Image: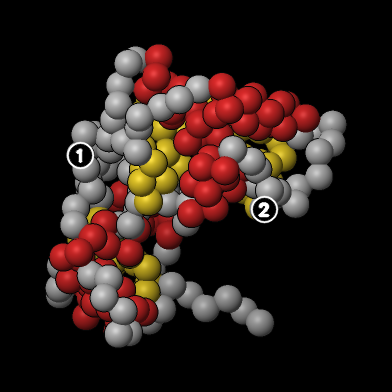
Amino acid sequence: MAKKPKFYVVWKGRKTGVFDTWAETEEQVKGFETAQFKSFESLKEAEEAFKSNFWQIVQKKQSGFLGNQTKSLALVGNPIAESISVDAACAGNPGVLEYQGVETSTKRVLFSMGPFPEGTVNIGEFLAIVHGLAFLQKHNSTLPIYSDSKTAISWVKNKAVKTKLERNAKNEELFQLVDRGILWLKNNQYANKILKWETEFWGENPADYGRK
């Protein structure tokens, strides 16, 4: 079955409007600080969304998913500007993997690793958080870390990685980093909070690679 085309709305970018390809959309938002954009299934939906602002659309979309749950933008609040954000990108799952950490408020890259020839998004997200913790410890910083991966956050808290990816010669370097990450967590204490990035309310994680 042919994949349905998507339409993209850019509220903040080099150019704003409705675009019908990701390539054209990416030109407007990649590397653009505080970019605001979202994909839609139909042109009509995209055109209607462009008439509203980004936050209205995100909150409306989220409230539809949550039904009678109490989670709302008012309860979630805004992200802490003085923080770092981490994310991973994987071309396939498993696939070529990389991860990075950035200043949340400016998107300035603080560290970047990869590409690794074979990995998974969850492994990358895990390593990004641990790398962030070690980076902040080195700089005597208690800033919080944002990640949009519940799985990776739980792995860090449990100091254990539960992956179905089999260890082999191709990904041995990556698994050695995982081993080092687990060992670091067991041997170090940190005051930094690890927080969930609320993508539904705040848009893409600042460390996102913008390849969707």
Residue at horizontal 42%, vertical 51%? 148
Confirm whether residue 80 shows in the render.
yes
Q: Which amino acid does label 1 sit on?
A: Ala
Confirm whether residue 107 shows in the render.
no
**Residue 170, picture quadrant:** top right
Secondary structure type for disc 2: loop
Residue at horizontal 39%, vertical 41%? 194
Q: In this view, does 93 lie above or below 145?
A: below
Where is residue 1? Give x, y as percent. 66, 82
Name the side, left or right, on which 3 lies relative to 147. right
Name the side, left or right, on which 129 lies relative to 46. right
Where is residue 46? Give x, y as percent. 29, 76
Residue nearest the viewer, comparing 190 with 5: 190
Label number found at residue 81: 1
Q: Is residue 158 above or below residue 197?
A: above
Name the side, left or right, on which 208 lies relative to 71. right
First-in-chain label (2 vs 1): 1
The residue that label 2 is drawn on is: 93
**Residue 30, picture quadrant:** top left
Mark 1 Cα shell of 10 Å, populated few (<14), some (14-19), many (≥20): few
Where is residue 13? Give x, y as percent. 23, 51
Q: Is residue 188 above or below residue 125?
A: above
Where is residue 79? Give x, y as percent. 23, 48
> Rounded to the nearest whole Å, what is the CA distance between mark 2 and mark 1?
31 Å
Instruction: Give the farthest residue toward the right.
Output: 169
Q: What residue type is labelled 2?
A: Asn
Residue at horizontal 72%, vertical 32%? 175
